[in-house]
Image (cartoon, coloured by chain):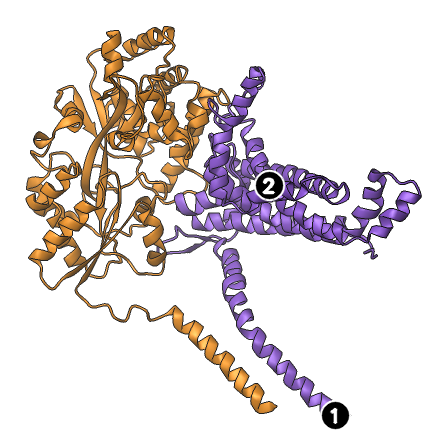
Chain colours: A orange, B purple
Amino acid sequence: MLRRTLVLASAAVTALGLLAGCGGGSDAGENESTLKVAALEGGYGRDMYTQVIDAYKAKHPGLDVQLQISKSIEDEISPNMKAGKFPDVVVLGQGRKAALTETLIKDKALEDLSGVRDQVQANLTDGITGNLNTDPYGDGKTYLMPMYYAPTGLFYNQGLFTKNGWKTPATWDEMFALGDTAKAKGIPLFTYPTAGYLDSYFFALLADIGGEQFYNDVMTYKQGVWQTPQARQALDLTTKLLSYAAPTTVGYANEQDFTKNQQSILDDKALFMPNGTWIVGEMKDAPRAKGFQWALTPLPAVTASGKRYLTTSVESVWIPSGAADKDAAKDFVAFLYSDEAAKIFAKSSAIQPIKGIAASLTGENAKFYKLYEDPDVAALVGGFASTAPVEGVDIKATLFDTANSIISKDKTEDQWQSALNDASEKLRQAGK
Amino acid sequence: MTRPAAAPKRAAAGGFVAACLLPALFLFALFMIWPTINVFRMSLYQWSGFSPVMRFVGLDNFTKLLDDDQFIRAFQNTVALLVVVTVVTMGMGLLLAAIMTRAKLRGRNLYRFVLYIPNVLSVVVIAAIFSAIYDQQNGLLNGALRLFSAEGLQRVWLGDQKIVLWSVATAMVWQSLGYYMVLYMSSMSSIPEELYEASALDGASAGRQFFTITLPLIWQNLRTSLTFFIMSAVNLSFVLVRAMTGGGPDGSSEVLLSYMYKQAYTNSSYGYGMAIGVVIFAFSFLVSLLVSRATKREPLQF
């Protein structure tokens, strides 16, 4: 009997040993010359990455480049990252819901890419580096290389405007006048997919009102910046604009229904919405009003001859500090800016900030990127500066999501302003 | 078999039982106890989730919670959901189960099937179904109201901050009602029929029978399922809120778990999120304890 028990006990121990064995040592077969690339599968598709990697491999025989690509790449790489296994190169911008890039910036867990920047500087469009998007700590060191850029602004139906003989408003007065005209025809002036899409709107508006200096003050949480008259003007204009919002906006402003708000532009049930150039591809299969044609305009100017900013969304490529082979990773990043790679990317309409590339565009994209040629229009890149995390404070949510409450009149403009002031102040203290 | 042989045999059997239990205990400790301890430990630190630096901050995370309006709102929402959803689901579950078992309804198998189906569906599917029902323009609900010329009752079900929480609650009730109904049906059907026959001869009405025979006899079942339900409602509210409203509009449908997720994973405040986790743990523990104390009765048997 005793012997039997012993046998059983040893069987149990063996089973446990097997279980424990599953936990470790699965990556014994990895060799040194493997480059792990992780990329977000955005609206541009995945083919362009495989092609670029093939081109790179052709130049570096013996090197194995593994591509991990997904629409929710954060969910796939972050568990491994928490366990200390980092990819070598990551193509992923800021402003995603999972905020992986932002978290790593806050943690100072990115590799300094200033060397790569200097190497490819000659190819890059002027002014695309040296802002908070690429140099998150504002110290002149580049940690995120700009990958693709796209203008964001107010999208509308050109066909509807032509049919009614409307002009795209150049100033806010014209904007609200158009709002009244359209209202008489039963078309609301404004809608947004979700409140989060107001980011491009607010960034441009703040710069339109107070210039880039003021914009930077807001983004870096200067003391009392939300109590200035400029900030108040921005909130005044927005509150007035929100009073013109389509009545369906708030009810659809969630992850499940936001395309219905986008659909209202296609159906001529709203005039303008803030969005990015990906909207054309995103809604390409949706039904639309007769004569529909996508068009993009910067926000109206605050004063008649004022400068208008076009918030430019920039995807980034970066190398985590925990990457195994940083030199190989940097070489690969530099290759992404070569003519060969740029040509492959441009074929999928992923436009890199490389000189002369905009001239080669066709169709709707050409129209969108042409906006940059207007001398009164300037590109605006960046976003809120990174600070140490502050518990319970999310200034983006305070600035954007409150729009839902302003439309439904659950909060007043004054409450909005003071909440922004509080959040900004807490972040300023954390950033010191 | 002689008597003295029994003692070593029992010891051997005990060893065998222990050997059999060990793997399960090991897994339980690894995947349940250890993470729970970790949640408590992490709630005392300030950590972003990735960085190698963890700063010990003591109970700072908890004092910050008290000043956090969003947290308080999420807490209120969770409590409101728990109370309303529990009362409605349990009440309706009991009522329906009683009707199904006592009143020999025609086609009751079909009803049971229909009511049970939502429980099999994935929560994401339920969220999609309900966002179609609640759609402010072409939704089933507003469409039906229009059909009956009750336009005055139409609402933006997921866009109105005063209503959105109840819209979520309705979806929760719909999801869990069938499961609890079937649970109660099975315990009710095990009550011997002669008790009902005897009470009927004494002139007891169906209502009287329910309260004096059915309810006391399934009480132990009810207690267990109540505790169980409170636990699962906390989880279900998170999944539904996340898939249906994302906590919106403007945080008005945020619940504790969804707020914890936001803080821990998108606001890079992992330690703060874990502090919320500790609050959730303590809260569900406390509520379950209270419920189980409040519902304690002398067990009855038939």
Other residues around mark 1 within 10 Å, as few (<14) / some (14–19) / many (≥20) = few
Query: Farthest residue in the front direction?
Result: B106
Residue B205: x and y in percent read 86, 38
- Camera-nearest residue between A170 and B110: B110
Residue A250: x and y in percent read 44, 25
Residue A270 visible in the displayed image: yes
Residue A373: x and y in percent read 12, 23
Please report, as a chain letter, where disc 1 is located. Answer: B
* Viewport quadrant of the C terminus of chain A: top left
Q: Disc 1 or disc 2, which is closer to the eye? A: 2
Q: Amino acid at mark 2?
A: Val
- Residue of label 2: B114
- Camera-nearest residue between A221 and B11: B11
Tell me which corner region of the image, top left, top right, bottom left or bottom right, holds residue A266: top left
- Residue of label 1: B1
Circle 1 sits in a helix, a strand or a loop, which is it?
loop
Residue B247: x and y in percent read 48, 36
Q: Amino acid at mark 1?
A: Met
Residue A366 position (above or below residue A289): below
Tell me which corner region of the image, top left, top right, bottom left or bottom right, holds residue A240: top left
- Kindly identify the residue that appears in the image at 58 percent across and 51 percent down: B281
Q: Are marks 1 and 2 on the same chain?
A: yes
